Image (cartoon, helix red, strand yellow):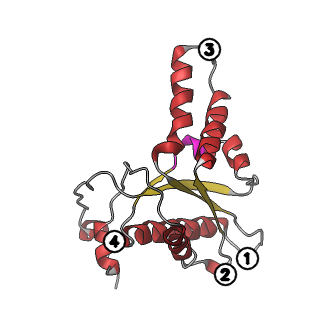
Amino acid sequence: MDVLEAIKTRRSISKFKPDEPPKELIEKILDAGTWAPTHHLTEPWKFFVLTGKAREKLGEAMAQALAEELTDLDSQESKVKLDSERQRPLRAPVIIAVAASPKQDPNVVELEEIVATASAMQNMLLAAHALGLGAILRTGKAAYRKKVKEFFGLSDKEYLLGFIYLGYPDMQPQKATRTPFSSKTVWLN
């Protein structure tokens, strides 16, 4: 697939068939992530691939993290929220959690490390699309909660930037439009 076509036709897919994509395709997506631009060649990304029961364990960690913020765990509302949180990772057969691990060096700008990792995620989303898979990037409060970061063994100096839900699409992508670049561009001479 031509890269410009991939950029313009990639859409977030939120419904997946239960079939898990082959490991070889997932590895191609991970490899695409490693080719993102990175200042000082630090390659600050970490990838965690979750399949099978690992998604359930993540759901439990997410529910435990949410429980710390709820005031009445016995209320029906809290039980519904916790169950919903537990189910989130089961929406796709594969999840790739992506973290930024900024190099601790005075010459390295932390924001650049985060931007490089975000670029890796975009490469992965485009690769998934080019390989005929569906994907959606999710963040939300779970990505920022301490217990969830601990689930992945991340330190306080690392950032969980998001979850790429991945699989075979079980929906038609929605049509999309974008604001023309000309309304957001200033040419300086």
Closer to the N terminus: mark 4 or mark 1?
Answer: 4
Residue sitting farthest toward the top: 75
Check the image and report above or below for 104 versus 67: below
Amino acid type at image mark 3: Asp
Residue 131 in view here: yes
Amino acid type at image mark 4: Ile
Residue drawn where x is 29% and y is 69% of the image: 8
Q: Locate residue 97, reporting x and y percent.
A: 58, 56
Give the residue number, with chain letter if any, for mark 4: 7
Label 1 vs label 3, nearer the camera: 3
Residue drawn where x is 38% and y is 51% of the image: 17
Closer to the N terminus: mark 3 or mark 4?
Answer: 4
* Residue 107, numbered label: 1
Give the residue number, with chain letter if any, for mark 3: 74
* Residue 12, numbered label: none
Which quadrant does the N terminus fall into? bottom left
Whether the residues at callouts 1 and 2 have beta carbons within 8 Å, the answer is yes
SS at mark 4?
helix
Closer to the N terminus: mark 1 or mark 2?
Answer: 2
Q: Is residue 175 left or right of residue 31?
A: left
SS at mark 1?
loop
Give the residue number, with chain letter if any, for mark 2: 40
Badge 4, how many Cα within 10 Å: few under 14, some, many 20+?
some
